[in-house]
Every structure is written in structure tokens, then in C-alpha cells.
Image (cartoon, rainbow, N blue to C red):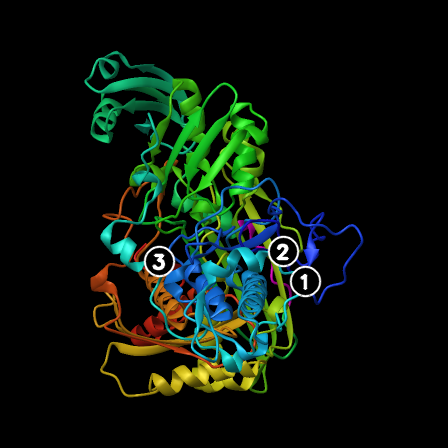
């Protein structure tokens, strides 16, 4: 149901939840039943997606999601422009502040899927009302009018901008033309490769991030943090720092000691002048080897294989991985006695507002959170550590602050993908897999639920694994392959380590390990990896993307010694993807991916160019996390501190050739943002294995 809202301009709204009750006092569309109590509402319901046509001929949709580089604002603008027949340049998609209720979650590759229906329905209703308003003005049948470039046009050539019609369109209750969205056959914007609407602003510096904001009185702020995870402040001598030029305040916070100064240069200088004694964190006795040992011990047993079957088995280790978004965590906070205002990039602004309110001791209604675009996230901005810390510093310093976590702060004390250990067994007989078992253990996120209290206890204990399905998409969950009896159990190890959802949560390690085993089963059976997958995949769509990359990537072509191809597939978010990789591992210690070919079926691809960029990013993620990027734990401390030692792929590591093939589809959109990581990672690992004749088991390979 789509509603009209009382306003001086045309304003329509649609609920963002499947079971959302109608807004009180809302006026339903002509297609919806009217109720006696229905009257025009006086404001936009907070659970709604709201579209307004302004007198300046702009279409404004305040988006209850965050833009972190994934291109969601462009995709939504395209949906709106499509149904309104508006110029894309006339569509504005600002980000909504945190609301008091409703879904503002950005994650799980869900944004386009959740907005596709509501956004198009909104725009279709607005178009119907604008056309009706023009028909009444010109005294013409509405069916003879058309819309183009943010205008309504009559058969005789007369035209009117949407902005000139918005006030009269707002008073229309029953449009004279259909308010249904267009069929896909009439799409002219959706499905067309489109440059991002914010591209020019980004490259010219016009786009504003949290660090660019000029909030009155907010001073640059940094924090001195302990050398180990969870380390505690014992004492601090701040006399030298306080006496330095440009220093406004030095305050103690839970994570260390904050310095508020006139510039970030002054703040970092004063931070380094602090004389601090730290108590070691709860993991001070642990390093990588001990963590890996505990994870291995926590993996549940695989049980007995079927009688008469041969076994292909593998154990796989995945290191901790930092999100390391290009824009470091930054938050501006102004906390006063009776209210607080925060500016930062958040994937969960409603939860963030509640957490900030609790931390500073204010009612949630007294805390205002402004959502700002982010320069990358990959799951990092689901958490709001920096915003809470900024609010606490502002309260203690009694002034607005602009807090910036340095790169080292986030890598050494921020969230990370948990390390995990996997044990997989494929049982095969008579040329086919008859049973497939995947057991795994990862560092548990229960530490996060327990809070810092757990950091003061034991350094880590093994939790007896329960017989339960693992958190990620085991084959038993998605039925990707016809592998007979499929099962999977999981265990965990509790460690006082800050964890966070990392792009392609769980799938990025679980499917990667499984795709390696699929290749090894094919080798054991004497079959080609692509041919073997084709005979065992359940889904026609997955077979189609596999066939596409095999054909486009010239699967099986002869390559020089030390070079090879690898392939992998993945299915999730009502979408599927295949990836073919070519690698040059002539020097096994310095392999280089030379070509990546990906094919994806995501249903309707709203912006194929944006999808291609997403797939390109997942290819780089796969290259990085398989070959070289991970975090070491040395005596309770994260060893890495910057891109200099957290070896994410640089330009020199990127493939020389990249292709993305978007499969045509009439389905509604599936998810795409995280889809490609498991397939890319699996293909890189399989290509390396074939090029070197090895069986890689620990990732990244350079650990």
C-alpha cells in the first residue's frame, strides 16, 4: 500500500516492512480499500519511504539506508527516475537521520531487494497524480498525456514541469491513470549501465564525509590506546601534553586517553607526549599458534563415513581479517546536559542512537544521529564504537569533538573477521559423492554480548561444540550440490577479541573451503573441475553462470608451467555467481592473478555498471584474503597497523584483465554486494593449487 501525505507539495509514502500496519490517518491509493477513519496525515510515518516532488522540480527521497560506496543511492535514484520518467539529475537521494522506529539496516546485501518495490510504487503513484493534475489544468483526457524528462507533455506540445504541478497533484486523491509500476519490457533506466550520481562529487571533493563536516566548536580528537587488546589504563601523566600548543583537553575514556586539540597535528603530537602505564589485556599470553590450536580442538568430530566409500578430506585455517575501509572511522559528537547530536556513517543508526543514549545517560529521544556517507565499510560500520567513544569524550570534555581513529587504531583495536578452522570430508563411491560433512569452529562473538567484563576474566576457553548447524551457509542449508547426505556442525572458542561482520559473513570462509574440496574430489575421480560441477550442481541458474565463465574465460586452455586456471561458484541472497581465475605462480611465494572472469545472476540488475563494480571489488577481496591479507596476534596484540603490513591487494596485485557478465533475468533483484567473495576466493585458491601442484590449507597463503 502506498499513501499520500498531507503537504503543500506532492508527497507520497510506502511502508518498508512486509507486515507494516497502515500509518494512522493515511490516505490509501485508489487500489487500496478506504476506511471511514482515513484522513490526510500531517507528517511522514517513520517506517515509510517518502518521496516528495518539490516546486524546484526536484524529486527528493530521504533514504533510510547509508551510502558507503556500494552505490545504493544511484540504484534508488534509477528506480525513481524510471517510474517517474524523470531525469536522473533531478532525483536527490539524501540520507535519513536515525529514526525512532522502522528498518534502517544496511547490510546482508538487502538494500536494493528491500527498496525495489516501495521505491517504484512511490514513483508510479506520484507520476499518476502529476499526469492527472496536468490533465485537469489543460482540460484534456489524462490518457493522452505522457511524461518525459521530469515534465508532463500534451499531444499539442504543451508541457509542464513536475514542480509546477506538485501543489495541485498533492490534492488529488484518485488518479485518472494507472499508478502501477511499469513492466520490465518498458524499462529505459533500470537495467542500463549508469555512472554513479555522486561520482563527480566524490572525485572533486564535494562529497562530504564525517571528517569534512564543520560542526560549530567541534575540535579534532584522537585517543592513546593500549598496546594489547583489552589492555587497561593504570596511570597517565598528561602534564607535558596539556602544556603543548593547541591542546584543549585531555580526558580518560574506557579505551584509553583522549586528546582534544586545535588540529589533528596538535592532537597526535600531544597524544604521543602522554606518559601512560598500561596493564596487559586478557590475551597477553596468547599468540597465533595457541589460537589456532584451540580452534582446531573446538571443531566437532565428523562422525563415521558411509561404508564402502573413499574419502577426500581437508582441514583449513583462516586468519583474522580487518575491514580496513579507506575512510578511517570518524565521528562528530556534541553532548550537552540535556541532549546530544552525533554525525557519523552508520549501517545501524537506530541501534546506534539507543547505544549512545545509554552510554551518555540520556533518553533516546534526546539523542539525534545524523547519518553521513562512508568511504567504505564491508561490515565495519554495522558497529558504532567510534560514535559511542566520541559521545563519551564530548561529555567528559564538555565540548563538541571530531574524533578520528587512526588506521592503526582500527586495525589493532577495531573489529575483525573471526579466525576459523574447518574440517571437511567428502565421501564418494561409484564415481559420485554420497556424503559431505563440514564441521568448523570460529572465535565466538559471545564476547561482544558479554561486554568488556569478559576481557577481565580468562584468556580464552574452549566451548564444547554443540551439534548444531554452523552460522554460515553449509551445503545442508542451500543444497548447492547433489552430494547425498550432507551435514554440518560448529563449535567456538571464546576470546576477548572485538569481532565484526566482514563482507560475505561466514560464506567467505565456508564456501571457499568447500569449493577447494570440490576441486579435490573432481581430481580424485579423474574429472575436470567444471565438468564435475556441472553434473552435481542442483540449480540451472548456477550451471548457467558456470558455463558462462567457462566459455568467456576459455576454460581448459593451455598455459605455461606455473600458471593455471581455477573456478568456483556460490549461491546466496536469491542470486548466484561463478568465477574463473588465471594465476601466475611461477614464483609460488609471489603469485599474481592475471585474469578474472565472473558471471552473476542477480535477477533484475538495476545498475549493471554498479554490479560490475561490486563484482570487481569482491574479486580483489578474494585475491587479498587468499593470498596475502590477514592479521597476526602476538602476545595479545595485533601485529599489523597499516596498509604497509596489512597486505591488502594494491594495483600491482590486481588482475590484468577483468570481465563481468550479467545474466539477463526477469526476476526481481536479489542481493549482490557480498555475493562474489566466496566464489572469487575459492577460484583463486583452486588456481593456485593447480598451478603449484599443492593443496593450500592456511589462508592467507603468506602466513
How packed is label 2: few (under 14 Cα within 10 Å), some, or many (20 or more)?
Answer: many
Q: Which of marks 2 and 3 precedes in the sequence?
A: 2
Secondary structure beneath dot 3 equals loop
- Magenta region: 297-304
Outermost residue, front side: 139
Outermost residue, right side: 36
Inter-mark Cα distance, 3 to 2: 54 Å
Q: Is residue 97 left or right of residue 641?
A: right
Q: Which of marks 1 and 2 precedes in the sequence?
A: 2
How packed is label 1: few (under 14 Cα within 10 Å), some, or many (20 or more)?
Answer: some
Q: Which quadrant would the C terminus be assigned to in this image?
A: bottom left
Q: Is residue 300 magenta?
A: yes
- Predominant secondary structure in magenta? loop
Position of 601 relative to 438 (above/below): below
Q: Which quadrant would the N terminus be assigned to in this image?
A: bottom right
Q: Position of residue 568 (x, y in %)?
A: 44, 74
Q: Position of residue 304 (x, y in %)?
A: 64, 67
Inter-mark Cα distance, 2 to 1: 7 Å
Residue linked to disc 1:
29
Residue linked to disc 2:
4
- Mark whose residue sits in front, 3 or 2: 2
Instruction: Choose top left, top right, bottom left or bottom right for residue 503.
Output: bottom left
Residue 196 appears in the figure: yes
The residue that appears at 40% across and 50% down in the rendered structure is 377
Look at the numbered discs 2 and 1 and tell me whether their residues touch, using CB distance below 8 Å: yes
Amino acid at each position: 500500500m502506498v499513501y499520500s501525505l498531507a503537504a503543500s507539495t506532492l508527497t507520497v509514502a510506502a511502508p518498508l516492512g512486509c507486515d507494516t500496519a497502515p500509518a494512522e490517518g493515511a490516505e490509501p491509493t485508489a487500489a487500496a480499500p478506504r476506511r471511514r477513519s482515513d484522513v490526510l496525515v500531517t507528517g511522514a510515518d517513520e517506517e515509510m519511504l517518502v518521496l516528495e516532488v518539490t516546486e524546484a522540480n526536484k524529486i527528493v527521497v530521504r533514504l533510510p539506508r547509508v551510502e558507503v560506496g556500494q552505490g545504493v543511492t544511484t540504484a534508488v535514484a534509477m528506480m525513481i527516475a524510471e517510474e517517474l520518467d524523470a531525469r536522473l539529475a533531478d532525483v536527490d537521494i539524501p540520507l535519513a537521520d536515525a529514526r525512532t522506529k522502522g528498518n534502517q539496516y544496511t547490510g546482508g546485501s538487502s538494500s536494493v531487494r528491500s527498496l525495489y518495490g516501495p521505491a517504484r510504487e512511490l514513483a508510479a503513484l506520484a507520476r499518476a497524480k502529476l499526469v492527472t493534475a496536468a490533465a485537469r489544468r489543460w482540460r484534456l483526457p489524462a490518457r493522452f498525456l505522457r511524461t518525459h524528462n521530469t515534465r508532463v507533455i500534451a499531444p499539442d506540445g504543451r508541457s509542464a514541469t513536475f514542480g509546477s504541478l506538485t501543489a495541485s497533484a498533492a490534492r488529488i486523491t484518485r488518479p485518472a491513470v494507472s499508478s502501477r509500476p511499469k513492466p520490465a519490457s518498458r524499462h529505459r533506466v533500470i537495467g542500463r549501465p549508469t555512472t554513479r550520481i555522486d561520482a563527480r562529487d566524490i572525485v572533486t571533493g564535494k562529497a562530504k564525509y564525517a571528517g569534512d563536516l564543520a560542526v560549530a566548536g567541534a575540535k579534532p580528537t584522537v585517543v592513546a590506546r593500549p598496546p594489547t587488546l583489552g589492555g587497561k589504563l593504570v596511570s597517565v601523566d598528561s602534564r607535558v601534553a596539556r602544556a603543548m600548543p593547541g591542546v584543549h583537553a585531555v580526558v580518560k575514556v574506557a579505551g584509553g586517553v583522549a586528546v582534544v586539540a586545535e588540529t589533528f597535528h596538535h592532537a597526535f603530537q600531544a597524544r604521543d607526549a602522554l606518559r601512560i602505564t598500561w596493564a596487559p589485556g586478557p590475551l597477553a599470553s596468547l599468540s597465533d599458534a595457541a589460537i589456532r590450536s584451540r580452534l582446531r580442538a573446538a571443531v566437532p568430530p565428523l562422525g563415521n563415513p558411509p561404508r564402502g566409500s573413499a574419502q577426500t578430506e581437508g582441514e583449513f585455517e583462516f586468519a583474522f581479517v580487518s575491514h580496513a575501509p579507506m575512510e578511517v572511522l570518524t565521528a562528530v559528537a556534541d553532548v550537552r546536559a540535556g541532549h546530544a547530536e552525533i554525525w557519523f556513517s552508520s549501517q545501524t543508526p537506530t541501534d546506534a542512537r539507543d547505544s549512545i543514549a545509554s552510554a551518555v545517560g540520556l533518553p533516546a529521544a534526546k539523542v539525534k544521529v545524523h547519518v553521513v556517507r562512508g568511504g567504505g565499510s564491508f561490515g565495519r560500520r554495522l558497529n558504532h564504537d567510534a560514535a559511542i567513544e566520541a559521545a563519551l569524550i564530548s561529555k567528559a570534555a564538555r565540548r563538541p569533538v571530531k574524533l578520528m581513529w587512526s588506521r592503526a587504531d582500527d586495525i589493532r583495536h577495531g573489529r575483525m573477521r573471526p579466525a576459523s578452522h574447518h574440517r571437511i570430508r567428502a565421501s564418494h563411491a561409484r564415481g559420485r559423492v554420497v556424503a559431505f560433512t563440514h564441521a568448523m569452529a570460529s572465535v565466538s562473538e559471545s564476547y561482544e554480548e558479554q561486554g568488556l567484563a569478559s576481557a577481565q576474566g580468562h584468556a580464552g576457553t574452549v566451548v564444547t561444540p554443540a551439534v548444531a548447524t554452523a552460522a554460515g551457509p553449509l551445503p545442508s542449508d542451500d543444497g548447492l550440490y547433489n552430494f547425498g547426505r550432507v551435514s554440518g556442525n560448529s563449535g567456538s572458542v571464546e576470546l576477548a577479541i572485538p569481532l565484526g561482520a566482514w563482507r560475505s559473513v561466514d560464506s567467505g570462509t565456508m564456501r571457499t573451503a568447500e569449493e577447494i574440496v570440490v576441486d579435490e574430489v573432481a581430481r580424485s575421480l579423474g574429472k575436470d573441475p567444471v565438468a564435475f560441477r556441472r553434473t552435481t550442481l542442483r540449480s540451472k541458474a548456477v550451471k548457467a553462470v558456470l558455463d558462462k565463465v567457462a566459455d568467456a574465460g576459455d576454460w581448459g586452455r593451455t598455459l605455461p608451467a606455473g600458471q593455471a586456471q581455477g573456478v568456483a561458484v556460490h549461491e546466496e541472497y536469491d542470486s548466484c555467481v561463478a568465477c574463473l581465475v588465471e594465476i601466475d605462480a611461477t614464483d609460488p611465494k609471489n603469485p599474481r592473478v592475471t585474469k578474472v572472469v565472473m558471471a552473476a545472476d542477480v535477477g533484475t540488475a538495476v545498475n549493471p555498471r554498479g554490479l560490475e563494480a561490486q563484482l570487481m571489488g569482491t574479486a580483489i577481496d578474494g585475491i587479498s584474503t587468499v593470498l596475502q591479507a590477514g592479521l597476526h596476534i602476538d602476545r595479545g596484540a595485533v601485529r599489523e597497523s597499516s596498509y604497509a603490513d596489512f597486505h591488502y591487494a594494491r594495483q600491482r596485485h590486481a588482475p590484468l584483465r577483468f570481465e563481468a557478465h550479467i545474466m539477463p533475468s526477469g526476476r526481481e533483484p536479489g542481493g549482490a554486494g557480498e555475493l562474489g567473495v566466496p566464489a572469487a576466493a575459492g577460484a583463486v585458491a583452486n588456481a593456485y593449487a593447480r598451478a603449484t601442484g599443492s593443496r593450500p590449507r592456511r589462508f592467507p597463503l603468506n602466513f
